[in-house]
Amino acid sequence: MLHFAVAGSPLSTPLPGGTLEGLQRAKELGIDAMEIEWVQQVPSGTERMKEIREMARELDMALTVHAPYYVNLNSPEKPKLEASKQRILKALSQAELAGAVSVCVHAAFNLKLPPAKVYDNVRRSVAEIMEQKEKLFPHVNLALETMGKPSQFGTLEEALKISKEFGIYPCVDFAHIHARFQGKFNSTEEWNALLDQYEAALGRGSLKTMHIHYSGIAYGSSGERKHLPFSESDAQWKDFLSVLKKRKVGGVLVCESPIQEEDTLLLKKMYDQL
């Protein structure tokens, strides 16, 4: 089954807002999943996490998490590298308490280093993080995201290679891939090729539990610029949904449109009609 998630609390959530209120509002709108946006910092309270878990269970809502942006597992500065690893571990452990299934992470900036060196640095840090899995996040997936700029670690090949090694699965952001390659990967043939590559790397049945990001996106020669509503972008979103439906892709698709619930519902309603 494919769940359609709003990225954060819906814009129409009554004030003062918050995750619990956002979950309730999303459910009222007919949305069955949410990505909790811990992009600035991860909350520390454990009781709040238990409340989120109970609320999501009561509403039958699937949950994913977006970890903080301030992460670089390729940093040459040891304090920054250690802080990055700790932010990821905290996001994973709190996501475990909240009942989320997967945590999306922007892994690293390349810093003009050779791709092989960057991969080795990221891999070393992921290995250290995964050593804590059984203790801190036994049921949560660490999803390294495909990124929208060539200056960032996160081609699909890199994300799949490291995921296969550690028995995890990536967050495949189809909009980022589209932007990174300046307009490519926006057709049925290309999406099928990407999904074939994913399944070949992670095994038969891996398409049933994907963590997907999707939206319209603006891009230029350096890749991603900003996310856009579908109506303002070149995204062939109806064709994209048809591919997901025909391939019986499952898991959680997070709509990262700036108009949040409006485009999330657009996707969900079209998908249900296919």
Image (cartoon, helix red, strand yellow):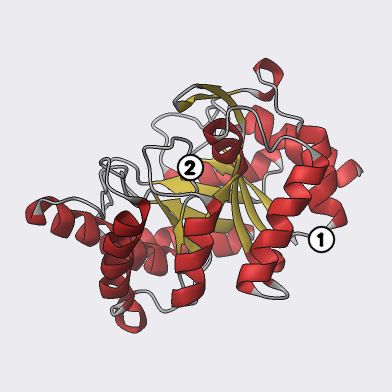
Assign the C terminus to one quadrant of the image: top right
Quarter-of-image position of residue 271: top right
Q: Position of residue 14 (x, y in %)?
A: 49, 30
Give the farthest residue toward the right: 274
Give the farthest residue toward the top: 232
Q: Residue at x 54, y 38 (%)?
A: 176
Does residue 175 appear anywhere in the picture? yes
Q: Residue at x 56, y 31 (%)?
A: 179
Seen from the viewer's position, the closer of residues 235 and 17 is 235
What element does badge 1 sit on? Answer: loop
Please tell me how crowded label 2 is: few (under 14), some (14-19), or many (20+) other residues with Cα within 10 Å.
some
Assign the N terminus to one quadrant of the image: bottom right
- Tell whether 39 sits left or right of 271: left
Does residue 99 appear anywhere in the picture? no
Residue at the disc numbered 2: 21
Seen from the viewer's position, the closer of residues 137 and 56 is 137
- Tell whether 262 sits left or right of 83: right
Q: Which mark is residue 248?
A: 1
**Amino acid at dot 1:** Lys
Seen from the viewer's position, the closer of residues 270 and 15 is 270
In the displayed structure, would residue 218 be above or below residue 193?
above
In the displayed structure, would residue 245 be above or below residue 266?
below
Please tell me how crowded label 1 is: few (under 14), some (14-19), or many (20+) other residues with Cα within 10 Å.
few
Q: Which mark is residue 69?
A: none
Quarter-of-image position of residue 127: bottom left
Q: Position of residue 212 (x, y in %)?
A: 60, 51
**Amino acid at dot 2:** Glu
What element does badge 2 sit on? Answer: helix
* 1 or 2: tag closer to the N-terminus: 2
Q: CA distance from mark 1 to mark 2?
A: 31 Å
